[in-house]
Image (cartoon, rainbow, N blue to C red):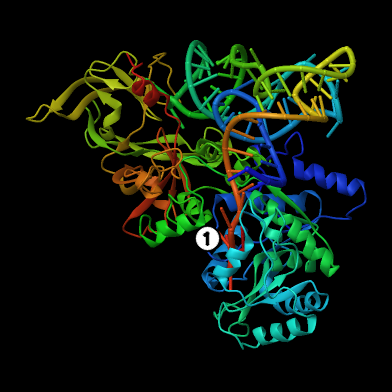
Amino acid sequence: MTDTSTSNANESPRPSKHFIEQAIDADLAAGKIKGVHTRFPPEPNGYLHIGHAKSICLNFGLAQAYGGTCNLRFDDTNPSKEETEYVESIQDDVRWLGFQWDSLHYASDYFDQLYQWAEKLVLDGLAYVCDLDAEQTRAYRGTLTEPGKNSPHRDRSPQENLELLRQMKTGEFPDGSHTLRAKIDMASPNLNLRDPVMYRIMRAHHHRTGDAWCIYPMYDWAHGQSDSIEGITYSICTLEFENHRPLYDWYCQSLEIHHPRQIEFARLNMTYTVMSKRKLLQLVKENHVNGWDDPRMPTISGLRRRGYTPESIRGFVTDVGVAKFNSTIDVVRLENAVREHLNRVAERRMVVMDPIKLTITNWPAGEVEMVDAINNPEDESAGVRQIPFSGSLLISQDDFQEDAPRKFFRLKKGGAVRLRSGYIIDCHDVVKDDDGNVIEILCTYDPETKSGQDNSGRKVKGTIHWVSAQQAVPVTVRNYDRLFAVENPDRVEEGKTFLDHLNPDSLSVTQAFAEPEIKSATAGDRFQFERLGYYVVDADSSESELVVNRIVPLRDSWGKMVAKGKAN
RNA sequence: UACCCCGUGGUGUAAUUGGCAACACAGCUGGUUUUGGUCCAGCCAUUCUAGGUUCAAGUCCUAGCGGGGUAGCCA
């Protein structure tokens, strides 16, 4: 149970405890438990997403906070959906988030024990073999408002049930022809208690047990007992299992085994995001994204590739809290969490996205001067680097306007601006092409205004970033935006699907020019490109091509003003 | 329509468990700044409604309203 990374500001402990911690405190005080043992129990049928991160942080975090233990257990009771690829990715993701399980388990480890317990329930008259098929079972179950009716096979003798169960196990019956069901109450208002199925016959190859079994336990029949076997004290799960708790309790009580306490919390929902595994799988399978780790995916692997840090995800998760209210978190909270972290730790670099040529007419021809640039104004220990400055520069087209609005503090004709870490320059002219577009900006520099040693007293409103044209390094930039264009992609009109809400501009690839220092960067390095945003070097980079992903843009109050028409 | 759960600023989460509704994010104002970033300050609430208990109710009681979950041999 180790948190391997350093703490960060928004990971500091909350001032008050959430309802699960309060429940634990009460149990501890009442002597009901002696320690805290939790587990994270994913089904290996897909990649983990940010919602799972909440569960991971909760379960591992509780164990940490109370000096207890937390297991990782794969809930692999349905071989038709589960794959080894997923069990590997899940382990990678949990570790990457900064957690280490105390022990690793599989529900399939308990198949033998589960089966023995099933025979016990049969012998105790608490379970029976039912010959109804799936459709008949549904019909007998009744509805939300009407009670069900008893299966015609409900009153078989324990001995007969035992024989039939053994035949089920040894493969005497075809798939779907029989089930083992708990004998509870077909009239219960809680449908989970209307003689729930414990075992179904399913000839499928299991990723761990192979073809040893042709009957597989249902979730309810496997989950609580798995918790029990591992000595779990708190079985923490999401709200939709609330109605299953009476059944969870019934199994533990009927079996007279260690009885963990199930506590439910609200799963994480986020704006501009879909979270269902089915939909994420569809995005991957239909190639709307480039795989599970596409940087636009809300998967842990997607966020990792996007450049999110584990610290920022943990910070986000503690920040949004744990409760039973079914809420939707604004995705800007996630974006803000990574900004907050990266602002403190990411070194700055200058990169020009949409370049226009800027010539300094009074610069000594051919001369290149190395200027100092601060690596991180938030962290003096990050030091300084050197950047080549010359008479031929590239700046962003956004940073120049001939006819600028009143509040435009960047470069305009007849105006002045500071070149970050360089000099103040004055724009005296522009060069245009035949269509009248500005293709080159002509400036003079003020030698008295060198950054760090400026005694001129000159003040200018704006500072812009730049690179020296000769030394500039081309970089392929993948500017990612939200995958969906609307706040709630799950809400769709008749005849449409969530796919209709995909944001067509969620990725734009562009060629940019970076200061030469960028050449020393390797995959996984994160930077703040000054005035633009945070970026991470992607694994697709090679000797010949540097590829970076935009993690999140910087806040842009100028852009906001322009959008609101307040720039004048 | 049955059962279960949940309702506190725009969004989330708190409130010493009956004692001045707080924090964060967003938004809006302004300040600082060699990143229009960061940072700093200010503003932003009839606690779903109606009754009741109480010196005192977000918290307790009653009724209503609203939202979510549940009818897989999925998890």
Left or right: A259, with B37 as reference point:
right
Q: Give whichever of A8, A235 is nearer the camera.
A: A235
Q: Residue at x 37, y 49 (%)?
A: A499
Q: Give whichever of A91, A114 is nearer the camera.
A: A114
Q: Residue at x 86, y 68 (%)?
A: A256
Please rate how many residues cluster around mark 1, counting C-alpha atoms within 10 Å: few if below 14, some from 14 to 19, many from 20: many
Q: Quadrant of the C terminus of chain A?
A: top left
Left or right: A195, with A352 as reference point:
right
Q: Position of residue A322 (x, y in %)?
A: 68, 42
> In the figure, residue B74 lies in which quadrant?
bottom right
Which chain does tag 1 point to? A
Q: Residue at x 52, y 60 (%)?
A: A47
Q: Is residue A59 above or below residue A412?
A: below
Q: Give whichever of A399, A41 is nearer the camera.
A: A41
Left or right: A122, with A100 as reference point:
right
Q: Residue at x 61, y 47 (%)?
A: A267
Q: Is residue A123 above or below residue A413?
A: below
> In the figure, residue A486 lies in which quadrant?
top left
Q: Amino acid at mark 1?
A: Tyr
Q: Position of residue A563 (x, y in %)?
A: 35, 24
Q: From the image, tell me which residue sits under label 1.
A: A47
Count of numbered badges drawn on the protein = 1
Residue A379 appears anywhere in the view? no
**Element at label 1:** loop
Q: Give whichever of A20, A167 is nearer the camera.
A: A167
Residue A421 appears anywhere in the view? yes
Q: Position of residue B43 (x, y in %)?
A: 59, 12
Left or right: A512, with B28 as reference point:
left
Q: Quadrant of the N terminus of chain A?
A: bottom right
